[in-house]
Every structure is written in structure tokens, then in C-alpha cells.
Image: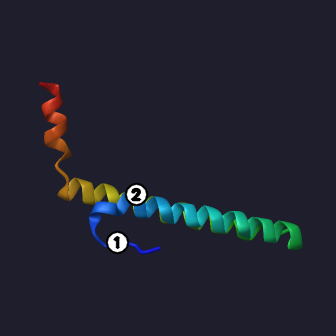
Amino acid sequence: MVFNLKCNHLLLMMLSLEFIVISLFYGLWLNLYIYLNENYFVIIFLTMSVCESVLGLSILVSIIRSYGNDYFSSFNVLW
């Protein structure tokens, strides 16, 4: 999978990264639950993945506020 550094596909890139994290979480949970019956590491991993997704969402919002022109298109709908 090739990640593009341009802002055109940032939301798609973040969505695919979240799918990878969810797949890793499911595999990690299955392995640790079946073999070791350990759930604490899975909770820590899930907490870190939530922090990662919040950081990505805040970067996306800051990019949209800095470079987006959503204000004009939403303002034109009112008239």
C-alpha cells in the first residue's frame, strides 16, 4: 500500500490506517486471549490507537481550517 503525501487523499489514508490498526487489534486480542489469557496489553494497545486516531483527526481538521475553502461554499448555500 502506497501512502500519498499530498493532502488530497489524507482522509482515505487515515481510514486505511485505522483498518490496519483494527486488524492488528483483532489479531493481537486473539493471540493473547487464546494463549496467555492476558487482556491488559490489549487495552494499552487500544488506548494508543485511539490517541493515534485523535491526533490524525486533529491534523486533518487543522489542515482543512488552514487550506480549505469550506467557509465560502457553506456560506453560498444560505442565500
Which label belongs to residue 57? 2
Say which of 76 and 36 sits in front.
Answer: 76
The residue carrying pointer 1 sits among few (fewer than 14), some (14 to 19) or many (20 or more) residues within 10 Å by Cα, namely few
Residue 15: x %, y % from top left: 47, 58
Quarter location, residue 79 = top left
Q: Amino acid at mark 1?
A: Asn
Name the residue located 34 percent from the left edge and 72 percent from the top edge: 4
Is label 1 in a helix, a strand or a loop?
loop
Please indicate, yes or no, whether residue 32 appears anywhere in the rendered image. Answer: yes
Q: Which residue carries the number 1 mark?
A: 4
Q: Amino acid at mark 2?
A: Leu
The residue carrying pointer 2 sits among few (fewer than 14), some (14 to 19) or many (20 or more) residues within 10 Å by Cα, namely some
> Image height check: is 68 above or below 37?
above
Q: Which residue appears farthest toward the top when viewing the image?
A: 79
Residue 20: x %, y % from top left: 57, 66
Please indicate, yes or no, whether residue 55 appears anywhere in the rendered image. Answer: no
Quarter location, residue 23 = bottom right
